Image: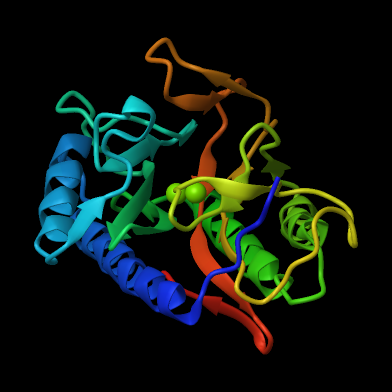
Amino acid sequence: GMITIKSAREIETMARAGHIVFETLALMRTVVRPGITTEDLDREAEAFIRSHVGATPSFKGLYDFPKTLCTSIDEEIVHGIPSTRRVLREGSIVSVDVGACVDGLHADSATTIPVGAIAPDVQRLLDVTERSLHAGIAAALAGNHVGDIGHAVQRVAETAEFGVVRELVGHGIGTRFHEEPQIPNFGAPRRGPQLKPGMTLAIEPMITMGNPATRTLKDNWTVVTQDGSLSAHFEHTIVVTATGPRILTN
Ligand code: MG
Ligand code: MG
């Protein structure tokens, strides 16, 4: 497939969308607490995104997904659907994934948020997953390859003896939410497409405490670990530049 190179103007538009996404996740960190529902999070996130003139939630209607956020609790890896019946409990973790679109260009980011106080081993899962994301971003250098990103993520996660989800991957992003290339969170250095300045990528490790094998629930969306182990998800949209990666979702 073809990997598009974005113009400077397109990149600045994506950075505007990315800033809204960043602020949305910052808001979610202040809103998450025991007793709140994932529907509450979704309502606040959608209102916040739409409060910016010209900004719309990327997920709503994408492949017929019904909501602004994906909210995935504990053993749910990704694509959980916000619901009034899903109440957050003390000690849980909730992965919040959100996209925003400005002037036809998208940005995509995710973070896993503790609900109240969480156990130290769960905090370690979150810390390692976020660290693996930043290792992947650091490998997104012009002249490197997609495999360098996956290799960097995998090394951090597996050194910590966590699992790397294989069935779900990062992606190019721009005028379409999912573009080429696919970006696995595992791989070998120097393999896959070569990275060039102007490529915009969503890098998104999904890391599990146990076995990373997945299954999809009967709602046809929510992806969970087969063994019920906890899963974390951190994501940024970045642009490859001649002088290194730039995070657009900050
Ligand atoms: Mg995402
Ligand atoms: Mg993504």
Q: How many labels does the image show?
A: 0
Q: Which of 199 and 137 is in front in this view?
A: 199
Q: Which colour scheme is used?
A: rainbow
Residue 64 rendering spot, x and y as whole percentages: 32, 26
Residue at the outermost bottom position:
243
Is residue 170 toward the left or the right of residue 82 in the image? right
- Give the residue drawn at x 31%, y 73%: 16
Q: Is residue 119 left or right of residue 101?
A: right
Q: At 31% from the left edge and 63% from the top edge, which residue is drawn?
A: 21
Q: Where is residue 109 in the image (x, y as percent from the top left)?
A: 43, 57
| Residue 224 x, y percent position in the rendering | 52, 26
Residue 241 percent location from the top left of the image = 63, 81
Image position of 72 with respect to 13: above or below: above
Whether residue 38 is visible here, answered yes or no, is yes
Q: In this view, does 131 lie above or below 147?
A: below
Residue farthest along the top direction in this orientation: 218
Residue in the foreground of this view, choosing between 155 and 123? 155
Taking depth in this image into account, of 58 and 148 the one nearest to the observer is 58
Q: In this view, does 191 lie to the left or right of 173?
A: right
Determine whether 146 is above or below 12 in the image.
Answer: above
- 189 left or right, relative to 248: right
Q: Is residue 250 visible?
A: no
